[in-house]
């Protein structure tokens, strides 16, 4: 009978990255996956014969560059392709297209709402600020709340400094982003349901 130090359930990108780091640390790792495809939300599937869909592949953009480099993923076949646009079909035959080209996207959005076209870039700028605030938190080792060790107390100090550095307005926006529903948050910016659903 085989013995493993760690069993990872699910061969999505998070499970695979976890398994790779554990294996590099000398652990004997078994990865179990129910499906016949690995990669989880990052896979491209032929759902309709002749048509391939990136089911949730936008999440691969969240894969940290450090991980790609440390695990030398390109040498194992990872190839990231930039997405030029998205397409959201509607039941009435209409559609919403968004493009890498901001002016082209704003022109498309004007078919639905001038307000949404005007707010689109402001929202992108706002979310870039929010992502910078969150990115640092994601890479921090969280402090142990019940510990009084100097290293954990220093962790609380780093968190406090990070939040103080955001300023009141940005901190409030970050709390709202993390606690509001996606629908409520997007309602503050946009009026077109198809745009909110696409985002």
Image (cartoon, rainbow, N blue to C red):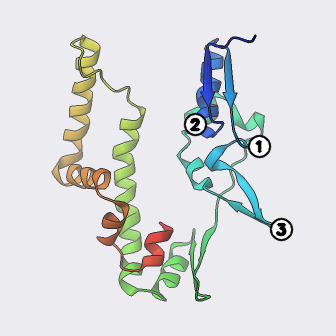
Q: Please report the residue visible at 61 percent of the width from the left and 49 percent of the height from the top.
A: 41
**N-term mark: 3 or 2:** 2
Mark 3 is surrounded, within 10 Å at the Cα level, by few (under 14), some (14 to 19) or many (20 or more) other residues, namely: few
**Along the horizontal axis of the image, is 72 left or right of 143?**
right
Mark 1 surroundings within 10 Å by alpha-carbon count, few (fewer than 14), some (14 through 19), many (20 or more)? few
Residue hosting label 3: 50
Q: Nearer the viewer, mark 1 or mark 2?
A: 1
Q: CA distance from mark 3 to mark 1?
A: 19 Å
The local secondary structure at tag 3 comes to loop
Q: Are marks 3 and 2 in contact (CB under 8 Å)?
A: no
Q: Is residue 195 above or below residue 172?
A: below
Residue 196: % across, % down: 43, 71
In the image, 162 versus 4, the foreground residue is 4
Which quarter shows the N terminus? Answer: top right
Labels in figure, total: 3
Secondary structure under the numbered disc 2 in the rendered image: helix
Going from N to C along the chain, the mark reached first, 3 or 1, is 1
Residue 90 versus residue 39 in the image, above or below: below
Q: Residue at x 64, y 17 (%)?
A: 24
Apparent side of residue 107 relative to residue 75 in the rendered image (left or right): left
Labelled pair 1, 2 in contact (Cβ < 8 Å):
no
Could you tell me residue 66's position as x and y percent? 56, 33
Q: Residue at x 77, y 34 (%)?
A: 75
**Residue hosting label 1:** 36
Quarter where residue 123 is shown: bottom left
Quarter of the rendering containing residue 155: top left
Q: Which residue is mark 2?
A: 14
**Does 49 sit left or right of 87 as displayed?**
right
User: Residue at horizontal 31%, vertical 66%?
Assistant: 184
């Amino acid at each position: 009978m085989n013995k493993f130090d760690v069993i990872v359930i699910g061969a999505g990108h998070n499970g695979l990255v976890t398994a790779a780091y554990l294996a590099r640390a000398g652990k004997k790792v078994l990865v179990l996956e129910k499906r016949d495809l690995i990669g989880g939300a990052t896979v491209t599937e032929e759902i309709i014969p002749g048509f391939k869909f990136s089911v949730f592949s936008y999440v691969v953009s969240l894969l940290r560059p450090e991980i790609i480099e440390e695990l030398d993923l390109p040498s194992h076949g990872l190839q990231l392709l930039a997405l030029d646009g998205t397409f959201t079909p509607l039941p009435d035959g209409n559609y919403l297209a968004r493009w890498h080209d901001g002016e082209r996207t704003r022109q498309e959005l004007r078919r639905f709402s001038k307000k949404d076209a005007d707010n689109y870039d402001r929202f992108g700028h706002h979310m870039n600020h929010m992502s910078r605030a969150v990115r640092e938190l994601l890479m921090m080792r969280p402090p142990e709340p019940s510990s009084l060790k100097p290293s954990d107390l220093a962790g609380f100090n780093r968190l406090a400094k990070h939040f103080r550095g955001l300023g009141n307005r940005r901190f409030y926006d970050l709390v709202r982003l993390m606690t509001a529903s996606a629908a409520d948050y997007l309602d503050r910016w946009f009026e077109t349901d198809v745009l909110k659903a696409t985002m």
